[in-house]
Amino acid sequence: MEKKTRKDMFLITIGICVYNEEKNIRSLLNSLLNQKTSNTIKEIFVISSACTDRTDEIVEHDFSKYPKIILLKQEKREGKASAINLFLKHASGDILVLESGDTIPAEETIENLILPFKDPKIGMVGGRPIPVNNKNTFMGFTSHLIWGLHHRLALKNPKLGELVAFRKELDIKLPIDTAVDEAYIEALVQDKGYKMIYAPEAIVYNKGPETISDFLKQRRRIFAGHIHLKRTKGYMPSSMNKFEIMKLIIEEIKSNKTNIFWLSGAVLLEAYGRLLGSYDFYLKKDKHAIWSVAATTKVYIPMVNQSNPVTTCSSNSAIHRMKPGPDIMQNIEFTKSSYSETIPVSESVLPCNQLQIMQKR
Protein backbone atom coordinates (compact mmCIF):
# COMPACT_ATOMS: atom_id res chain seq x y z
CA MET A 1 0.00 0.00 0.00
CA GLU A 2 1.37 3.41 -0.98
CA LYS A 3 2.75 5.39 1.95
CA LYS A 4 0.78 8.53 2.62
CA THR A 5 1.77 11.81 4.19
CA ARG A 6 -0.32 13.23 7.02
CA LYS A 7 -1.73 15.76 4.56
CA ASP A 8 -3.09 12.96 2.35
CA MET A 9 -4.85 11.11 5.16
CA PHE A 10 -8.50 11.60 5.99
CA LEU A 11 -10.77 10.98 8.94
CA ILE A 12 -13.72 8.93 7.70
CA THR A 13 -17.23 8.70 9.03
CA ILE A 14 -19.43 5.90 7.72
CA GLY A 15 -23.22 5.92 7.80
CA ILE A 16 -25.40 2.83 7.35
CA CYS A 17 -29.14 3.48 7.07
CA VAL A 18 -31.09 0.37 8.01
CA TYR A 19 -34.60 -0.95 8.31
CA ASN A 20 -34.79 -4.57 9.48
CA GLU A 21 -31.30 -5.68 8.41
CA GLU A 22 -30.73 -8.34 11.09
CA LYS A 23 -29.54 -10.88 8.52
CA ASN A 24 -26.68 -8.75 7.21
CA ILE A 25 -25.79 -6.02 9.72
CA ARG A 26 -23.30 -8.12 11.71
CA SER A 27 -21.42 -9.19 8.61
CA LEU A 28 -21.40 -5.63 7.28
CA LEU A 29 -20.03 -4.14 10.51
CA ASN A 30 -17.38 -6.87 10.75
CA SER A 31 -16.32 -6.10 7.19
CA LEU A 32 -16.00 -2.40 7.96
CA LEU A 33 -14.00 -3.08 11.13
CA ASN A 34 -11.60 -5.22 9.10
CA GLN A 35 -11.00 -2.71 6.31
CA LYS A 36 -7.42 -2.32 5.12
CA THR A 37 -6.96 1.42 4.85
CA SER A 38 -4.22 3.95 5.51
CA ASN A 39 -6.90 6.46 6.49
CA THR A 40 -8.72 6.46 9.83
CA ILE A 41 -12.28 5.26 10.16
CA LYS A 42 -13.24 7.55 13.02
CA GLU A 43 -16.84 6.46 13.52
CA ILE A 44 -19.49 4.17 12.06
CA PHE A 45 -23.10 5.25 12.55
CA VAL A 46 -25.94 2.77 12.16
CA ILE A 47 -29.13 4.78 11.61
CA SER A 48 -32.06 2.56 12.53
CA SER A 49 -35.42 3.67 11.12
CA ALA A 50 -37.83 2.09 13.62
CA CYS A 51 -36.52 -1.44 13.06
CA THR A 52 -38.88 -4.17 14.26
CA ASP A 53 -36.44 -7.09 14.04
CA ARG A 54 -33.16 -7.77 15.91
CA THR A 55 -31.07 -5.16 14.08
CA ASP A 56 -30.84 -2.77 17.03
CA GLU A 57 -30.15 -5.60 19.47
CA ILE A 58 -27.28 -6.91 17.34
CA VAL A 59 -25.68 -3.47 17.04
CA GLU A 60 -26.13 -2.68 20.75
CA HIS A 61 -24.92 -5.93 22.24
CA ASP A 62 -22.58 -7.62 19.78
CA PHE A 63 -20.40 -4.56 19.17
CA SER A 64 -20.38 -2.90 22.61
CA LYS A 65 -16.58 -2.96 22.85
CA TYR A 66 -16.24 -0.80 19.75
CA PRO A 67 -16.93 2.83 20.74
CA LYS A 68 -16.62 3.94 17.11
CA ILE A 69 -19.86 2.04 16.28
CA ILE A 70 -22.77 4.27 17.26
CA LEU A 71 -26.46 3.47 16.98
CA LEU A 72 -28.82 6.30 16.07
CA LYS A 73 -32.50 5.40 16.51
CA GLN A 74 -35.48 6.95 14.78
CA GLU A 75 -38.74 6.26 16.56
CA LYS A 76 -40.66 5.97 13.29
CA ARG A 77 -39.88 5.44 9.62
CA GLU A 78 -39.52 8.79 7.92
CA GLY A 79 -37.70 7.71 4.76
CA LYS A 80 -34.04 7.18 3.97
CA ALA A 81 -33.40 10.88 3.30
CA SER A 82 -34.48 11.67 6.85
CA ALA A 83 -32.13 8.98 8.19
CA ILE A 84 -29.26 10.39 6.13
CA ASN A 85 -29.90 13.89 7.46
CA LEU A 86 -29.69 12.50 11.00
CA PHE A 87 -26.36 10.91 10.10
CA LEU A 88 -25.07 14.17 8.59
CA LYS A 89 -25.99 16.00 11.78
CA HIS A 90 -23.69 13.79 13.89
CA ALA A 91 -20.90 12.89 11.44
CA SER A 92 -17.56 14.60 12.13
CA GLY A 93 -15.11 13.07 9.64
CA ASP A 94 -13.45 14.83 6.71
CA ILE A 95 -15.03 12.36 4.28
CA LEU A 96 -18.52 10.96 4.80
CA VAL A 97 -19.38 7.52 3.44
CA LEU A 98 -22.89 6.17 2.90
CA GLU A 99 -23.23 2.41 2.51
CA SER A 100 -26.47 0.50 2.05
CA GLY A 101 -27.31 -1.85 4.91
CA ASP A 102 -27.82 -4.79 2.57
CA THR A 103 -24.29 -4.75 1.10
CA ILE A 104 -20.80 -5.99 1.99
CA PRO A 105 -17.57 -4.18 1.03
CA ALA A 106 -14.39 -5.93 -0.06
CA GLU A 107 -11.49 -5.45 2.35
CA GLU A 108 -9.80 -2.52 0.53
CA THR A 109 -13.02 -0.89 -0.65
CA ILE A 110 -12.88 2.08 1.71
CA GLU A 111 -9.24 2.73 0.80
CA ASN A 112 -10.07 2.71 -2.92
CA LEU A 113 -13.15 4.84 -2.36
CA ILE A 114 -11.22 7.55 -0.50
CA LEU A 115 -8.13 7.64 -2.74
CA PRO A 116 -9.59 10.06 -5.37
CA PHE A 117 -10.14 12.74 -2.71
CA LYS A 118 -6.43 13.55 -2.91
CA ASP A 119 -7.60 15.73 -5.79
CA PRO A 120 -9.24 18.78 -4.13
CA LYS A 121 -11.59 19.16 -7.10
CA ILE A 122 -13.27 15.82 -6.39
CA GLY A 123 -16.36 16.21 -4.24
CA MET A 124 -17.99 12.78 -4.52
CA VAL A 125 -16.87 9.22 -5.29
CA GLY A 126 -18.93 6.08 -5.89
CA GLY A 127 -18.01 2.40 -5.66
CA ARG A 128 -18.87 -0.53 -7.89
CA PRO A 129 -21.77 -2.77 -6.82
CA ILE A 130 -21.51 -6.43 -7.84
CA PRO A 131 -24.55 -8.66 -7.22
CA VAL A 132 -24.10 -12.12 -5.70
CA ASN A 133 -27.19 -13.52 -7.43
CA ASN A 134 -26.99 -16.73 -9.44
CA LYS A 135 -26.61 -15.78 -13.11
CA ASN A 136 -28.30 -19.05 -14.12
CA THR A 137 -31.75 -17.79 -13.11
CA PHE A 138 -33.70 -15.14 -14.98
CA MET A 139 -33.81 -12.70 -12.05
CA GLY A 140 -30.13 -13.31 -11.29
CA PHE A 141 -29.28 -12.66 -14.95
CA THR A 142 -31.37 -9.48 -14.81
CA SER A 143 -29.55 -8.19 -11.70
CA HIS A 144 -26.16 -8.79 -13.30
CA LEU A 145 -27.33 -7.12 -16.50
CA ILE A 146 -28.60 -4.01 -14.66
CA TRP A 147 -25.44 -3.57 -12.58
CA GLY A 148 -23.21 -4.48 -15.53
CA LEU A 149 -24.80 -1.72 -17.59
CA HIS A 150 -24.52 0.58 -14.55
CA HIS A 151 -20.78 -0.16 -14.42
CA ARG A 152 -20.20 0.51 -18.13
CA LEU A 153 -22.30 3.67 -17.98
CA ALA A 154 -20.49 4.94 -14.88
CA LEU A 155 -17.11 4.49 -16.57
CA LYS A 156 -18.21 7.06 -19.16
CA ASN A 157 -20.41 9.31 -17.05
CA PRO A 158 -20.41 8.67 -13.27
CA LYS A 159 -23.67 7.22 -11.93
CA LEU A 160 -23.14 6.48 -8.26
CA GLY A 161 -25.07 4.18 -5.95
CA GLU A 162 -25.03 1.66 -3.05
CA LEU A 163 -21.71 3.04 -1.75
CA VAL A 164 -20.79 6.73 -2.03
CA ALA A 165 -18.43 9.16 -0.31
CA PHE A 166 -18.38 12.95 -0.27
CA ARG A 167 -16.67 15.82 1.53
CA LYS A 168 -18.21 16.99 4.80
CA GLU A 169 -17.33 20.58 3.91
CA LEU A 170 -20.01 20.48 1.19
CA ASP A 171 -22.60 20.73 3.96
CA ILE A 172 -25.07 18.37 2.28
CA LYS A 173 -28.70 18.24 3.40
CA LEU A 174 -31.44 16.28 1.64
CA PRO A 175 -35.14 17.07 1.24
CA ILE A 176 -37.05 14.34 3.07
CA ASP A 177 -39.29 13.60 0.06
CA THR A 178 -36.54 12.30 -2.25
CA ALA A 179 -36.41 8.55 -2.99
CA VAL A 180 -33.02 8.71 -4.76
CA ASP A 181 -30.60 9.97 -2.14
CA GLU A 182 -27.33 9.25 -3.98
CA ALA A 183 -28.55 10.93 -7.17
CA TYR A 184 -29.74 13.95 -5.17
CA ILE A 185 -26.30 14.22 -3.54
CA GLU A 186 -24.79 14.08 -7.06
CA ALA A 187 -26.93 17.11 -7.99
CA LEU A 188 -25.86 19.04 -4.87
CA VAL A 189 -22.19 18.25 -5.44
CA GLN A 190 -22.46 19.47 -9.03
CA ASP A 191 -24.21 22.65 -7.87
CA LYS A 192 -21.28 23.39 -5.57
CA GLY A 193 -18.80 23.16 -8.45
CA TYR A 194 -17.13 19.88 -7.53
CA LYS A 195 -16.47 16.87 -9.74
CA MET A 196 -17.71 13.31 -9.27
CA ILE A 197 -15.77 10.18 -10.03
CA TYR A 198 -16.51 6.47 -10.26
CA ALA A 199 -14.06 4.14 -8.49
CA PRO A 200 -14.60 0.64 -9.94
CA GLU A 201 -11.91 -0.77 -7.63
CA ALA A 202 -14.13 0.08 -4.62
CA ILE A 203 -16.10 -3.18 -4.76
CA VAL A 204 -19.32 -3.61 -2.80
CA TYR A 205 -21.43 -6.77 -2.97
CA ASN A 206 -25.21 -6.63 -2.98
CA LYS A 207 -28.17 -8.92 -3.57
CA GLY A 208 -30.57 -8.16 -6.39
CA PRO A 209 -34.29 -9.00 -6.15
CA GLU A 210 -35.24 -12.63 -6.71
CA THR A 211 -38.84 -12.01 -7.77
CA ILE A 212 -40.43 -9.89 -10.47
CA SER A 213 -42.57 -8.20 -7.81
CA ASP A 214 -39.53 -7.08 -5.80
CA PHE A 215 -37.73 -5.98 -8.96
CA LEU A 216 -40.65 -3.76 -9.97
CA LYS A 217 -40.85 -2.32 -6.44
CA GLN A 218 -37.26 -1.14 -6.78
CA ARG A 219 -37.33 0.05 -10.38
CA ARG A 220 -40.59 2.03 -10.21
CA ARG A 221 -39.45 3.75 -7.02
CA ILE A 222 -36.08 4.70 -8.51
CA PHE A 223 -37.57 5.98 -11.76
CA ALA A 224 -40.23 8.03 -9.96
CA GLY A 225 -37.47 9.47 -7.78
CA HIS A 226 -35.41 10.41 -10.82
CA ILE A 227 -38.38 12.19 -12.42
CA HIS A 228 -38.88 14.12 -9.18
CA LEU A 229 -35.18 15.01 -9.09
CA LYS A 230 -35.28 16.31 -12.65
CA ARG A 231 -38.38 18.38 -11.85
CA THR A 232 -37.00 19.91 -8.65
CA LYS A 233 -33.26 20.25 -9.39
CA GLY A 234 -33.05 20.05 -13.17
CA TYR A 235 -30.59 17.21 -12.71
CA MET A 236 -30.75 13.97 -14.68
CA PRO A 237 -28.45 11.07 -13.70
CA SER A 238 -26.73 9.32 -16.60
CA SER A 239 -29.02 6.29 -16.25
CA MET A 240 -31.88 8.49 -17.48
CA ASN A 241 -30.15 9.06 -20.81
CA LYS A 242 -32.24 6.86 -23.13
CA PHE A 243 -29.76 7.03 -26.01
CA GLU A 244 -26.80 5.90 -23.90
CA ILE A 245 -28.87 3.09 -22.39
CA MET A 246 -30.04 1.87 -25.79
CA LYS A 247 -26.49 2.01 -27.11
CA LEU A 248 -25.28 -0.20 -24.27
CA ILE A 249 -28.18 -2.62 -24.72
CA ILE A 250 -27.41 -2.99 -28.44
CA GLU A 251 -23.78 -3.70 -27.57
CA GLU A 252 -24.95 -6.29 -25.05
CA ILE A 253 -27.19 -7.97 -27.64
CA LYS A 254 -24.28 -8.22 -30.09
CA SER A 255 -21.96 -9.75 -27.50
CA ASN A 256 -24.50 -11.98 -25.72
CA LYS A 257 -26.64 -13.62 -28.42
CA THR A 258 -26.99 -16.88 -26.49
CA ASN A 259 -29.13 -15.15 -23.84
CA ILE A 260 -31.23 -13.08 -26.24
CA PHE A 261 -34.55 -14.25 -24.73
CA TRP A 262 -33.57 -13.44 -21.17
CA LEU A 263 -32.01 -10.19 -22.33
CA SER A 264 -35.24 -9.22 -24.11
CA GLY A 265 -37.27 -10.15 -21.02
CA ALA A 266 -35.02 -8.09 -18.75
CA VAL A 267 -35.30 -5.04 -21.04
CA LEU A 268 -39.10 -5.34 -21.14
CA LEU A 269 -39.21 -5.72 -17.36
CA GLU A 270 -37.09 -2.59 -16.88
CA ALA A 271 -39.28 -0.68 -19.34
CA TYR A 272 -42.38 -1.77 -17.43
CA GLY A 273 -40.80 -0.67 -14.15
CA ARG A 274 -40.11 2.76 -15.63
CA LEU A 275 -43.67 2.95 -16.91
CA LEU A 276 -44.97 2.19 -13.41
CA GLY A 277 -42.63 4.83 -12.00
CA SER A 278 -44.07 7.41 -14.39
CA TYR A 279 -47.58 6.35 -13.38
CA ASP A 280 -46.69 6.69 -9.69
CA PHE A 281 -45.22 10.16 -10.11
CA TYR A 282 -47.61 11.77 -12.57
CA LEU A 283 -50.93 10.12 -11.64
CA LYS A 284 -50.60 8.76 -8.10
CA LYS A 285 -48.38 11.68 -6.98
CA ASP A 286 -46.29 9.12 -5.11
CA LYS A 287 -42.64 10.08 -4.69
CA HIS A 288 -41.79 6.86 -2.79
CA ALA A 289 -39.99 8.75 -0.01
CA ILE A 290 -40.86 5.86 2.32
CA TRP A 291 -40.74 2.81 0.12
CA SER A 292 -41.89 -0.79 0.31
CA VAL A 293 -39.11 -3.21 1.17
CA ALA A 294 -37.97 -5.70 -1.48
CA ALA A 295 -37.84 -8.67 0.89
CA THR A 296 -35.72 -10.95 -1.31
CA THR A 297 -32.81 -8.47 -1.19
CA LYS A 298 -32.68 -8.52 2.61
CA VAL A 299 -30.42 -11.51 3.12
CA TYR A 300 -27.10 -12.49 4.61
CA ILE A 301 -24.39 -11.78 2.00
CA PRO A 302 -21.27 -13.98 2.34
CA MET A 303 -17.91 -12.52 1.43
CA VAL A 304 -15.95 -14.08 -1.40
CA ASN A 305 -12.39 -15.34 -1.23
CA GLN A 306 -11.10 -16.98 -4.37
CA SER A 307 -8.73 -19.39 -2.64
CA ASN A 308 -10.14 -19.93 0.86
CA PRO A 309 -13.54 -20.74 2.36
CA VAL A 310 -15.74 -17.82 3.36
CA THR A 311 -15.82 -17.30 7.10
CA THR A 312 -18.47 -15.10 8.64
CA CYS A 313 -21.42 -15.36 10.97
CA SER A 314 -25.16 -15.38 10.45
CA SER A 315 -27.93 -13.61 12.32
CA ASN A 316 -27.99 -16.31 15.03
CA SER A 317 -24.30 -15.69 15.87
CA ALA A 318 -23.21 -19.12 14.68
CA ILE A 319 -20.00 -19.27 12.67
CA HIS A 320 -20.47 -20.64 9.17
CA ARG A 321 -17.86 -21.83 6.70
CA MET A 322 -18.90 -22.18 3.09
CA LYS A 323 -16.95 -22.61 -0.09
CA PRO A 324 -17.71 -20.01 -2.75
CA GLY A 325 -20.22 -21.62 -5.11
CA PRO A 326 -20.12 -21.16 -8.88
CA ASP A 327 -22.99 -18.69 -8.69
CA ILE A 328 -20.80 -16.38 -6.60
CA MET A 329 -17.44 -17.03 -8.22
CA GLN A 330 -18.68 -16.26 -11.70
CA ASN A 331 -19.53 -12.77 -10.52
CA ILE A 332 -15.86 -11.88 -10.00
CA GLU A 333 -14.78 -9.78 -12.97
CA PHE A 334 -11.60 -8.37 -11.43
CA THR A 335 -8.21 -10.00 -10.96
CA LYS A 336 -6.58 -8.39 -7.94
CA SER A 337 -6.75 -10.80 -5.01
CA SER A 338 -6.96 -7.85 -2.63
CA TYR A 339 -10.59 -7.38 -3.63
CA SER A 340 -11.72 -10.47 -1.74
CA GLU A 341 -12.20 -10.84 1.96
CA THR A 342 -12.34 -13.42 4.70
CA ILE A 343 -13.49 -12.32 8.14
CA PRO A 344 -11.11 -13.94 10.67
CA VAL A 345 -12.67 -16.56 12.94
CA SER A 346 -11.45 -14.65 16.00
CA GLU A 347 -13.40 -11.62 14.81
CA SER A 348 -16.52 -13.38 13.59
CA VAL A 349 -18.67 -12.75 16.67
CA LEU A 350 -17.95 -9.25 17.90
CA PRO A 351 -19.44 -7.54 20.90
CA CYS A 352 -20.90 -3.83 20.12
CA ASN A 353 -21.37 -0.21 21.34
CA GLN A 354 -24.45 0.58 23.38
CA LEU A 355 -24.34 4.30 22.77
CA GLN A 356 -27.71 5.29 21.37
CA ILE A 357 -28.78 8.71 20.26
CA MET A 358 -32.55 8.98 20.10
CA GLN A 359 -33.89 11.30 17.45
CA LYS A 360 -36.43 13.70 18.84
CA ARG A 361 -39.66 14.10 16.97
Image (cartoon, rainbow, N blue to C red):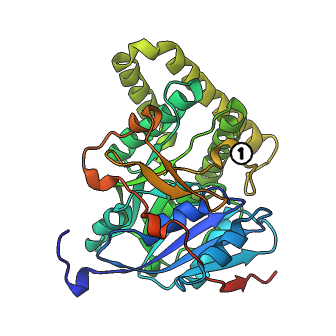
Residue 155 in percent (x, y) is at 33, 45
Label tally: 1
- Judge left or right: residue 202 versus residue 239: left
Instruction: Decide: is 203 above or below 122.
Output: above
Q: Is residue 20 above or below residue 264?
A: below
Residue 347 position within the rendered picture, expressed as x and y whole percent measured from the top left: 47, 69
Coordinates of residue 201 in the picture (x, y in percent) = 31, 54
Quarter holding residue 232: bottom right
Q: Residue at x 31, y 46 (%)?
A: 307
Taking 98 as reference, is 286 above or below it? Answer: above
Give the residue drawn at x 71%, y 71%: 56
Above or below, 20 against 10 in this view is: above
Can residue 84 be seen here? yes
User: Where does the C terminus fall, quadrant-wise?
Assistant: bottom right
Residue 169 is situated, as x and y percent measured from the top left of the image, at: 44, 81
Q: Nearer the viewer, residue 97 or 273?
A: 97
Q: Secondary structure at mark 1?
A: helix
Q: Residue furthest left?
A: 3
How packed is label 1: few (under 14 Cα within 10 Å), some, or many (20 or more)?
A: few
114 to the left or right of 352: left
Residue at image coords 63%, 39%: 219
Image quarter in which the N terminus is found: bottom left
Q: Kindly identify the amino acid type of the residue bearing the numbered disc 1.
A: Ala
In this figure, which residue is indicated by the disc labeled 1?
295
Q: Quadrant of residue 324?
A: top left
Q: Quick check: 38 left or right of 107?
A: left
Can residue 191 be seen here? The reply is: no
